[in-house]
Image: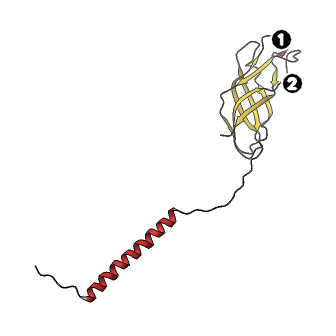
Amino acid sequence: MTTRPITRGRAARSAVAVATTLVLTAAVGGAAFAAWSSSGTGSGTAASGTATALTTSATTAPASAAYPGGPAVALALVASNPNGFPVRVTSITLDTARPVVVTGGSGTCTAPPVAVSATGLSINLAANASNVSLTVPGAMTLGASTPSGCQGATFTVPVVLNGQTP
């Protein structure tokens, strides 16, 4: 086996190659470190909005399906969501602050005992939606003491829509 003596030119080229490799490694490693270890300071602000109540413009129960002491019947609603975000209606209850309006009965039908209860709902109302027609099955019942003059009547029932953001 023969060995060649290292000449001065060859040693210089080797030293330059090693130095170049070290400089490139340091530069790439430094860039990678800088990319993964940046920091900064600053501030930010956010504001919460105020939710506006959902509204209903009509809530009726079909006259042919409801009878005193009978099973719960569907309510037909026209609802609006004035908020700039969607809302999911989760329950509906009777609005006891407003009266039930009865039209078209066979006789006198004042203040019929009406109950409204629908829970576990998942009805989505889009942001800024208006006059959306909905039907909620099994939501309203007529009490057993409903007067016979309410036969054939249509009931406009005030309700409260409860919901949350989806």
> Percent from the top left, x then y, of residue 45?
72, 55
Q: Is residue 73 left or right of residue 29?
A: right
Q: Is residue 9 left or right of residue 72?
A: left
Numbered disc 2: secondary structure: loop
The residue beneath circle 2 is 99
Residue 68 drawn above or below residue 121:
above
Residue 134 drawn above or below residue 144:
below
Q: Is residue 8 left or right of residue 59?
A: left
Q: In the image shown, does 163 or 37 lie closer to the viewer?
A: 37
> Percent from the top left, x then y, of residue 40?
61, 62
> Percent from the top left, x then y, of residue 157?
81, 26
Q: Are marks 1 and 2 in contact (CB under 8 Å)?
A: no
Numbered disc 1: secondary structure: helix
Q: What residue is drawn where x is 76% and y is 46%?
A: 49
Label located before the other in sequence (1 or 2): 2
> Residue 77's image quarter?
top right
**Viewport quadrant of the N terminus:** bottom left
Residue 49 drawn above or below residue 118:
below
Numbered tag placed on residue 148 in the rendering: 1
